[in-house]
Image (cartoon, rainbow, N blue to C red):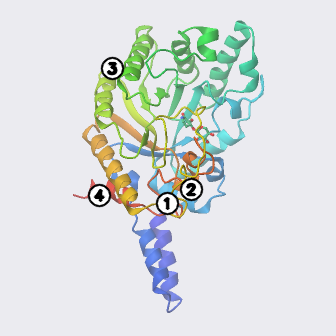
Amino acid sequence: MMKIHYVIYLGCLLAAGPVKSQQVQQTTATKEIPSLKAVFAGDFVIGTALNAAQVEGRDPRAALLVPQQFNVATPENVMKAAPIHPEWGRYNFGPADALVEYGRNNNIGINAHTLIWHSQLPRFAQQLQSIDSFRLFFQEHIKTVAGRYSGKVLSWDVVNEALNEDGSMRKSVFLDKLGDDYVTEAFRLAQEASPNTVLYYNDYNNEQPAKRAGCIALIKKVQAAGVRIDGVGIQGHWSLGKIPLKHIEQSILEYAALGIKVAITELDIEVLPRNFQGADVNQRMQATPSTNPYVNGLPDSVQQQLAADYRALFQLFLKHRDKIDRVTFWGVNDGNSWLNGWPVRGRTNYPLLFDREYQPKPAFWAVVGLKNK
Ligand code: XIL
């Protein structure tokens, strides 16, 4: 479909008589961009986070690029508790339904995100005082949301970010009100509501040794209770020149040894100054003149480092392709990455494989080049 489209377009340009050579070059270049999903077919599926504008077709260049490049997608926000369940007993399913529909129309499977998370939790739930009311919210939320998309999504991130950096349980409202069995309970409820869906635990920095140990303990606890857990998501919000390859590899091996799938669920590489690692959305950094250095473009040396980092990562993913079922980027292109707004608002960031013009960057060619040897 896509190929035919471009061939016809090119044909029209040529039939229209003399055209500027730049125009033809651009068209030809677009036509010749390899497809990530095709390049890695047989290794793992390739995903992207999608925002509402992309799903609703308000981003025409994404509308072309996304189905060409990706075979799965994760909603960046619309399935989180605050947007989908804004008030007690009231659900806002429209945007999430639109995503499911978009996936069906474009042959893109949906990796749903996320049922139980302390962030982007509706205000009413945060304010519930009684344990019984909170438990009821927890149960109803999972039953209703997971139930609605049962058979319509491939997977759920059932619980997101339940752990501290030292591997202990995060002191969230869930832990506070429900105790540390809440993770097991969430998986049990998700399985009941959506029996044929792949169920993941998802976190950032869970490739780091202490947090990984906590994550393994948590997964074993769910398994020991006889409750199904199918996979672990390593979010993969890493930083330029500091990709923890050794820890990632060790994590892939140890998680796979638990008999579960490993997915890289939110991949991006921070290229801007940062005084901490990871992706705690509640953590912020002060903006100073030096925190936004590349407003007018990325220096070549940084571009090359980004390409080298992505290349090393995908080399590792390919080495363990039998254990990794998915690699999902957190955004389609640099222009719509969340890292332009977090942990400092209003920065110009470059964390993905496609630039602001939806064109492949050197990092894209470095990744694709791994398969063309
Ligand atoms: C981010 C979204 O990209 C932003 O649009 C939103 O404002 C905050 O959340 N870990 C996760 C994702 O699991 O849900 C977060 O997404 C990024 C960190």
Of the image marks 2 and 4, the number of the one nearer the N terminus: 2
Label 4 Cα crowd, 10 Å radius (few <14 / some 14-19 / many 20+): few
Q: Which mark is residue 355?
A: 1
Q: CA distance from mark 1 to mark 3?
A: 38 Å
Q: Amino acid at mark 4?
A: Gly
Label 2 Cα crowd, 10 Å radius (few <14 / some 14-19 / many 20+): some
Q: Are marks 2 and 1 in contact (CB under 8 Å)?
A: yes
Q: Amino acid at mark 1?
A: Asp
Of the image marks 2 and 1, the number of the one nearer the N terminus: 2
Q: What is the x, y in percent for residue 36? A: 39, 54
**Can residue 1 be spotted in the picture?**
no
Residue at the farthest front position: 289
Q: What is the x, y in percent for residue 60? A: 61, 62
User: Ligand 1 shows up in which quadrant of the image?
Assistant: top right
Q: What is the x, y in percent for residue 298? A: 46, 60
Residue matched to label 3: 258
Residue matched to label 4: 369
Q: Is residue 276 above or below residue 169?
A: below
Helix, strand or loop under label 3: loop
Q: Which mark is residue 335?
A: 2
Q: CA distance from mark 3 to mark 4?
A: 32 Å
Q: What is the x, y in percent for residue 132? A: 71, 7
Name the residue at 52% across, 23% down: 195
Q: Nearer the viewer, residue 124 or 54?
A: 124
Q: CA distance from mark 3 to mark 2?
A: 38 Å
Of tags 4 and 1, the one toward the viewer is 1
Residue at the farthest bottom position: 18
Q: Is residue 173 above or below residue 26?
A: above
Label 3 Cα crowd, 10 Å radius (few <14 / some 14-19 / many 20+): some
